[in-house]
Structure formats: structure tokens, C-alpha cells
């Protein structure tokens, strides 16, 4: 499989990112990272590589400019991050090499809330959403209206976040699944934990993209 790698900038507002495009890609997944992270997130890049190997294009990008990231209040401003994800979605849908690809979202931590809110806020059809160690409860206002098939992945030892995901799962009316990775904590740092995330996410995206 041939994989094309590009450094991109979404302007305005000037968001840097990595676009990885396998030949004959079956779809494009946009990554919404968690608070304080960026396009360089080692965990999200690892998950993205697993998707690329399954023929899925990925876009990892900074939700904030360097100046904006210096203001910690922006890091936790879910509506602001949501709008940035919508902007990136519009950008992708207008690129010649991407515009015909089905779109999905992968959100980690607070990025999962941004992904769910962006699905409600974009005119582009989003085919699937995957949340890793996410806070979908922070998107409580849109959960009942979510249309995209949504997979919530939580670590079995991520106490507190499990309960928040269970509450969000109950509020979703779309096609949905909740998967708990045994013995994994919030960052899925345990041996093999992130590989289980990749397997679950890959199957979900392949099924729905």
C-alpha cells in the first residue's frame, strides 16, 4: 500500500496538521485531541497509523494556534474547539483529494465532546464517531440528537470516567456501542491497551465509512 504524507495548514485561522492519505482510501478520520495535546500526540499518532494500515486516511491537526494554546482557558473551551473541528471538516471537504471521502471523527478526552458537538454543528455528513477515554458528558446538550454511529471506548480502571461514559451512552439515540478495555487507565498506557483501542476503532470505522 502506498501512503502519502503531507504537512498542511488550515487557513484561516492557521492550524497546522498532518494529512496521511493511503491510496484508494475508504474514508477520512479527523482527530480531535484532548486538552493540552496537539498534532504531535504520540497516542493519537499511534492510533492513526493503525487506521492508515487499514486504508483509512487520517488528519491530525492543532485545534489551537500557538498563541491561543498559551491561554489555558482556550484549552477547555469546548464550543471554541468544536468550531475549529467544524472548520477543519469544511477544509477537508473542499480539498480535491479528500472531498469524496466519507468522514469520521476520533476524539480523545475533551476532544470527544468537541467531536460530538461538531457532528451536530456541521453541514457535512459524519459517518462515524469514536471516543477514546473521552468526556462525552461535556456534550450532553447534543447527545440525544447525535446521528453518527458512536463508539465509546473507556479504560476498565478509568474510574469516574466510566460512569460518565455510561451516562452519555444512555443518552445517545443513534447506533452506539460502549467498549471497556480491561485494566486500562485513562491514557491507555498499559501494554497492549492502545492496540485494543486501534482494533475497536478500526472495525467501527471500516463498518461505517
Image: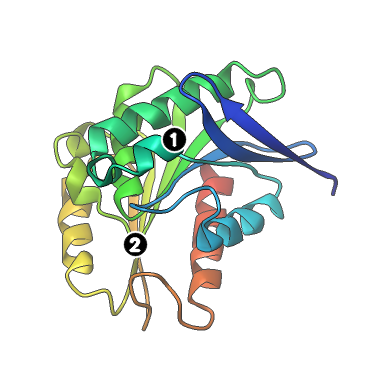
Q: Residue at x 28, y 42 (%)?
A: 71
Q: Which of marks 2 and 1 is nearer the N terminus?
A: 1
Residue 130 at x, y percent in the picture? 42, 50
Q: In this view, does 190 lie above or below 194?
A: below
Q: Where's the C terminus, which quadrant?
A: top right
Looking at the rendered structure, which numbered label has been put on residue 65? 1
Q: Where is residue 58 in the image (x, y as percent from the top left)?
A: 61, 42
**Helix, strand, or loop for circle 2?**
loop
Inspect this view and state whether residue 63 appears. Answer: no
The one nearer the camera, 17 or 26, is: 17
Is residue 130 something one can see in this rendering? yes
**Could you tell me which residue is drawn at 36 percent across and 46 percent down?**
150
Near mark 1 (Cα within 10 A), the count class, few <14, some 14-19 or many ≥20, is few
- Residue drawn at 40 percent across, 26 percent down: 86
- Res. 133 mark: 2
In the figure, 147 relative to 36: above or below?
above
**Quarter occupied by residue 143:** top left
The outermost residue toward the right is 2
Viewed as shown, does residue 52 lie left or right of 128?
right
- The foreground one among 198 and 20 is 20
| In the image, residue 196 above or below residue 61 | below
Q: Picture coordinates of residue 45 (x, y %)?
A: 58, 56
Q: Residue at x 49, y 20 (%)?
A: 90
Pick the residue in front: 103 or 83. Answer: 83
What is the distance, in whole Å, between disc 2 and disc 1 at their CAs?
24 Å
Judging from the image, what secondary structure is the residue with disc 1 in? loop
Mark 2, residues whose alpha carbon is within 10 Å: few (<14), some, or many (≥20)? many
x%, y% of residue 4? Answer: 79, 40
Amino acid at each position: 500500500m502506498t501512503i502519502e504524507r503531507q504537512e498542511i495548514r488550515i487557513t484561516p485561522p492557521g492550524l497546522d496538521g498532518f494529512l496521511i492519505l493511503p491510496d484508494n482510501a475508504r474514508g477520512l478520520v479527523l482527530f480531535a485531541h484532548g486538552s493540552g495535546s496537539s498534532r504531535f500526540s504520540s497516542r493519537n499518532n499511534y492510533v492513526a497509523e493503525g487506521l492508515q494500515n487499514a486504508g483509512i486516511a487520517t488528519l491530525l491537526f492543532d485545534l489551537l494556534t500557538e498563541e491561543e494554546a498559551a491561554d489555558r482557558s482556550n484549552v477547555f473551551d469546548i464550543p471554541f474547539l468544536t468550531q475549529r473541528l467544524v472548520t477543519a471538516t469544511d477544509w477537508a471537504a473542499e480539498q480535491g483529494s479528500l472531498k469524496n471521502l466519507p468522514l469520521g471523527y476520533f476524539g480523545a478526552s475533551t476532544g470527544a465532546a468537541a467531536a460530538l458537538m461538531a457532528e451536530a454543528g456541521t453541514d457535512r455528513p459524519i459517518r462515524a464517531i469514536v471516543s477514546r477515554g473521552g468526556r462525552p458528558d461535556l456534550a450532553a446538550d447534543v447527545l440525544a440528537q447525535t446521528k453518527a454511529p458512536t463508539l465509546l471506548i473507556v479504560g476498565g480502571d478509568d474510574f469516574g470516567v466510566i460512569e460518565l461514559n455510561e451516562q452519555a451512552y444512555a443518552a445517545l439515540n443513534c447506533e452506539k456501542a460502549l467498549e471497556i478495555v480491561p485494566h486500562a487507565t485513562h491514557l491507555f498506557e498499559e501494554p497492549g491497551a492502545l492496540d485494543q483501542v486501534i482494533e475497536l476503532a478500526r472495525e467501527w470505522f471500516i463498518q461505517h465509512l
